[in-house]
Image (cartoon, rainbow, N blue to C red):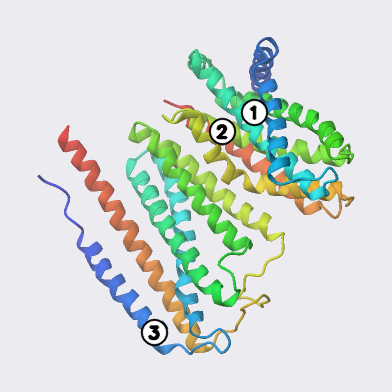
């Protein structure tokens, strides 16, 4: 057994992102003000936006890695693409679920057919189909080739989907820009700090998870080679 | 110039072959037609539709039945090549593979458009509302064009999986969502009497989908089929 050892940098990143998430949790729970109208449930917002951001980012990484595979034909790129999609689907689910927890008291409903919610749900379905596609393909090369093409096309359609649903009216609060919609608020300085801290921590967590998943794919490939 | 001529010729040859197979076999379009009508009837009972539908429902129903029926044709268009290993012959031919894509997506486009052209008078009859608008035809052409291009590319992918034709809808529907939304909204607008100017955004979105998915076919069809 001469399996690849876990890189030191990855272990360091594990620890760093764990500490980061705990720290962000403490900041969000104890150092941000309670929103005047919505109450404590508004605190979902920090991790909600951060995980939506991490989800989007990882699907972009998946498409980028897809381009990497198609140009270089190195399976490493495919491992990265697959890892990014898997992690992205989890972040997407976290974004949807945390959003629902927030929406129930604020909008008085678990779900509305708003552009962002619908696009995120469709995105989950698109990348769910990605796994179904891969599971039906026989060789790693075919999986990599078709997976790459699919990841690239998917990333290209997501903005179109968002735009097309956006042409309907939206009630999702737009916190960052000039805003309208139910449940809108402006952020105080402390909220801003917590918000950007969450974004940074989740980006770190994303990198850590994708790398770990990539490492797993690497081990898997090495293992299969040894069995042959 | 010569190479462009050759390219167009390849598209034409593939297209003509598909039309001929359909003409002699008559196994694609009739199935799509019957299936699309069945969907109309199923929805009619499932949603308790009245004969005087609002234009929104008519347009929605039209696109749902078109989208479902088109999947059958798309699957068949590629599995036909696969069955007799004709695909290998196509791939061995000294022709640009993206030309094969355009040929096949053109024939798929024609089949689905034909189904749409039958559905339009049928809908006008069943739901007491004339669907004969030049602008609706434009929406159908643009929408079906984008849908079948994306579908042809995805069908070439799904055919390689063990799950085969079962896989295509799962891949196609979520990715085709912007096309279907834009097509449905454009059609709804046309039927409720809005002008082209008011519906510009939807038509432009359809056009963008057409360009995007045909470009995707041009770029990726070769990659998808290489073995």
The image shows residue B126, relative to residue A106, as above or below, that is above
N-terminal-most mark, 2 or 1? 1
Image depth: mark 1 or mark 3 in front:
3
Q: Residues within 10 Å of mark 2 (few under 14, many from 20)?
A: many
Q: Which residue is mark 3?
A: A27
Q: Which residue is mark 2?
A: B153
Tell me the chain of label 3: A
| C-alpha span from label 2 to label 1 | 8 Å
Q: Is residue A71 at least partly visible in the picture?
A: no
| C-alpha span from label 1 to label 3 | 55 Å
Q: Position of residue A192 (x, y in %)?
A: 50, 83
Q: Residues within 10 Å of mark 3 (few under 14, many from 20)?
A: some
Q: Which residue is mark 1?
A: B105
SS of the residue at dot 1? helix
Query: Considering depth in this image, is B54 or A68 the residue closer to the camera?
Result: B54
Q: Position of residue A221 (x, y in %)?
A: 24, 41
Picture residue at 59% right of the left edge, 31% below the top: B152
Dividing the image into 4 quarters, which one contains the N terminus of chain A?
Answer: top left
Query: Considering depth in this image, is A81 or B192 the residue closer to the camera?
Result: B192
Tell me the chain of label 2: B
Tell me the chain of label 1: B
SS of the residue at dot 3? helix
Q: Quick check: B174 left or right of B38? A: left
């Amino acid at each position: 057994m001469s399996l690849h050892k876990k890189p030191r940098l990855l272990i360091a990143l594990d620890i760093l992102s764990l500490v980061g998430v705990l720290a962000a949790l403490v900041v969000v729970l104890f150092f941000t003000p309670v929103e005047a109208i919505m109450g404590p449930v508004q605190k979902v917002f920090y991790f909600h936006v951060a995980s939506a951001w991490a989800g989007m980012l990882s699907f972009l990484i998946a498409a980028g890695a897809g381009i990497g595979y198609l140009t270089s034909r190195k399976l490493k790129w495919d491992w990265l693409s697959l890892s990014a999609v898997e992690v992205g689907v989890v972040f997407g689910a976290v974004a949807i679920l945390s959003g629902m927890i927030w929406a129930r008291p604020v909008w008085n409903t678990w779900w509305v057919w708003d552009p962002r919610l619908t696009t995120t749900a469709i995105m989950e379905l698109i990348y769910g189909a990605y796994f179904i596609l891969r599971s039906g393909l026989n060789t790693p090369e075919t999986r990599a080739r078709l997976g790459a093409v699919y990841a690239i096309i998917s990333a290209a359609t997501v903005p179109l989907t968002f735009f097309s649903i956006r042409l309907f009216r939206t009630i999702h609060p737009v916190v960052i820009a000039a805003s309208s919609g139910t449940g809108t608020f402006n952020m105080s300085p402390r909220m801003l700090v917590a918000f950007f801290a969450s974004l940074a921590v989740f980006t770190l967590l994303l990198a850590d998870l994708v790398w770990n998943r990539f490492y797993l794919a690497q081990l898997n490939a090495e293992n299969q080679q040894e069995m042959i | 110039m010569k190479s462009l001529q050759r390219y167009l010729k390849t598209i034409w040859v593939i297209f003509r072959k598909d039309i001929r197979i359909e003409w002699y076999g008559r196994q694609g379009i009739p199935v799509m037609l019957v299936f699309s009508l069945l969907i109309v009837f199923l929805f009619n009972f499932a949603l308790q539709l009245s004969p005087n539908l609002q234009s929104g429902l008519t347009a929605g129903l039209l696109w749902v039945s078109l989208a479902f029926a088109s999947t059958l044709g798309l699957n068949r268009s590629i599995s036909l090549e696969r069955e007799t290993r004709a695909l290998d012959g196509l791939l061995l031919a000294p022709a640009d593979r993206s030309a094969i894509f355009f040929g096949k997506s053109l024939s798929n486009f024609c089949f689905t458009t034909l189904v749409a052209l039958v559905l339009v008078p049928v809908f006008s009859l069943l739901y007491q509302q004339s669907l004969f608008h030049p602008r609706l035809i434009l929406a159908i052409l643009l929408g079906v064009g984008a849908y079948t291009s994306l579908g042809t590319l995805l069908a070439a992918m799904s055919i390689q999986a063990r799950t085969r034709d079962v896989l295509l809808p799962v891949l196609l529907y979520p990715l085709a969502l912007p096309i279907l939304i834009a097509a449905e909204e454009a059609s709804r607008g046309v039927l409720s009497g809005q002008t082209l100017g008011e519906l510009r955004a939807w038509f432009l979105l359809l056009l963008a989908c057409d360009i995007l998915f045909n470009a995707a076919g041009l770029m990726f069809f070769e990659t998808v089929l290489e073995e």
